[in-house]
Image: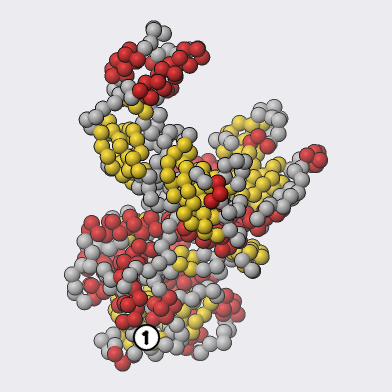
Amino acid sequence: MKELNAKSLIRLLAEQPEPQRWRDLVVLLDLSDSTSKRGVRQLLKGMVRNGELQQDHRGAYLLPRTRGTRTGFVERSGAGLSFMGVPLERERGMVLRPGDEVRAQIIGETVHVLEVLTRSTVPLVGIVRIRGRRPYVDSLSPDYKGRITLLNPDEADSDGESVAVEVTGEEGRALIGRIVEHLNGSGGVAQAVTTLLASHRVPEEWHPGVAAQLDRLPKKVHAGRHEDRRSLVDLPLVTIDGASARDFDDAVYAEQRRSGWRLIVAIADVANYVKAGSPLDQSASERGNSVYLPDRVIPMLPEVLSNGLCSLNPHVPRLALVCDMRVSATGKVTGFEFYEALIQSWQRLTYERVQEFLDERALDVEAAVSRSLNQLYRVFQALQQARERRGALDFDTHEGRLELENNRVKAIHPVHRLEAHRLIEEAMIAANVCAAEFIEKGRGPSAALYRVHEPPAAEKLEQLRQSLALAGVRIAKGDLTPLVVKAALAQLGEQSNRWLYQQLVLRSLTQAVYTPENKGHFGLALKKYMHFTSPIRRYADLVVHRTIKALLHADDPPYGADELAATGVHISTTERRAESVGWGVDAWLKCEYIAHRVGDEFDGVIMGVTDFGLFVELKGYYVQGLLHVSELGSDYFSFQQPTMSLVGERSGRQFSLGDDLRVVLRDAIPEQGRLELLLEKPERRSDRPKRRRRRR
């Protein structure tokens, strides 16, 4: 290496087409020994300190430029960040969050953040850790996963409590801040729910004006005031929901016709009460959807509506938007009609009661309800056969329901998917398809929000092929249609671990979104699909309802193209937010449920294999833990992608997807939904970690 000084280094950097990171400079300057590397490092640090060079958020070195420097805010862009519409590369360097005001240069397609001017005012939510001399907070906010050092150690009341922290700066590539709110430290369901709702910023307050708007709504539906609507009060419509449900937004009825059936799906007419642009509508749009949690629901609409005026409670008149369908003996919808109606549910039924009826053909209900249930089952069978023919995916449930007692999990029960669940699902799918067709015929495509589920990416398909090959299922090269996937899973027969491969298929699928651009629904094998059947809990359905009602009344379209596109992006994001909160609470509580069993043995099954270890699901608990590769023994284990396994170089021992394992719980970090596991070694039982209780 030639003699290097500040001037020669500046000249060298000026000749490069883009800023240089340390590893680039090592190659460029041919730094082969530690002495020369150390000398250049010191030179660079001095030049940055003197202002001769600048470092961006990625650690790259660039020459100071006053021209072309911009000031603006970091924004969320999909799963990443952006500045002025240009994606930000995430590197080890300064910590950036949405809402941070920064000074940056845009060179080509790359943003170089030079300085954070002001930090986002949105607090981070996390768990206090009192460790050593400086307590810190482990952030649980999606914007930042890491530690926040507390400026004032006395702010922390106790280890393990949930707090909100205002970020004030950065220190050694970690954020620093001060506690602005103590949220909850009681543990259990209350702390998990409160913390994750706050960390994901789920709105819990209603917009100003909502209370006054609710006061102006009628207290009940007066049947005589709605003569312009078709009356279906004499039809034995029923609601069928879970035993714990409190809002009922769909009712069903079926009767036999000469060549098939008449199938009615009546949906609560939420749009009659929630007018576009009103305070109620603004709150509903902001929330995007209801959030369902083990101990509560954060509703999209106030309970006065969701559990009252818009809920299809039995024996009271309600306003509904109806999809009245004709279904052939082969399960094809041969015709349909939408209209506004006045209805009255005859019964509030649960899935369990309907399943009893399907099994025994007897239920303590009126004869007309019984006849309708019989026909609903027959039309369901026809719709299900049509579903099989087109190849729609249909998976068994593999999840655990939490039973709560005194703010804690008392037990975890397997969730069973009944035929009664499928009966309602098929009726709702049929109505959703009709909604898409009705709007397309009346307004053309892109007039409302489709529920779009695109085919999996090519690399995901290849991984799925390899995974299924391990189970002896061969899939030919080419497009992987839903029908092909369904046929492949059928080859597994009734294997006990069939559910595992169904989970692998689910992981390979793309995430469904709301968009005015129709791209079909891969999972359901449908060319067009919209959400129409749950306007109490999903804003997308309310958008579809307003569009249908505008068509029925020959009104102008309620939404423009740009508004629809923006709404689709927003409510797709709120849906993911709700899912993240639900999954996070579920994992937190399951980990907390077994945290006192550190040192105990569990039966598990390998659900995932990576180069750094195995993800093992504990049987009966529906939660996964990490068994790190370093815990597999003294052998060196390498990851084999074709067989989805870790293989020992000396011993040849192999750990593969679907293998049963006996593991020991090493540690549990409930707040992060994380379990650390050890491999049970019968020949070295004395090495097991001693059982200990985690401090709550």
Residue 27, located in which quarter of the rendered image? top left
Q: Residue at x 69, y 42 (%)?
A: 678
- In the image, is 309 to the left or to the right of 246? left
Q: Which residue is mark 1?
A: 219
Q: Residue 544 at x, y = what percent?
A: 31, 67
Instruction: Judge whether residue 685 can be spotted in this image.
Output: yes
Instruction: Judge whether residue 605 can be spotted in this image.
Output: no
Q: Residue 481 at x, y = what percent?
A: 42, 50
Residue 682, located in which quarter of the rendered image? top right
Total number of numbered discs in the rendering: 1
Q: Residue 97 at x, y = what percent?
A: 39, 44
Compared with 640, 476 (above or below) is below
Compared with 351, 471 (above or below) is above
Helix, strand or loop at mark 1:
loop
In the foreground, 493 or 447: 447
Q: Residue at x 36, y 31 (%)?
A: 56
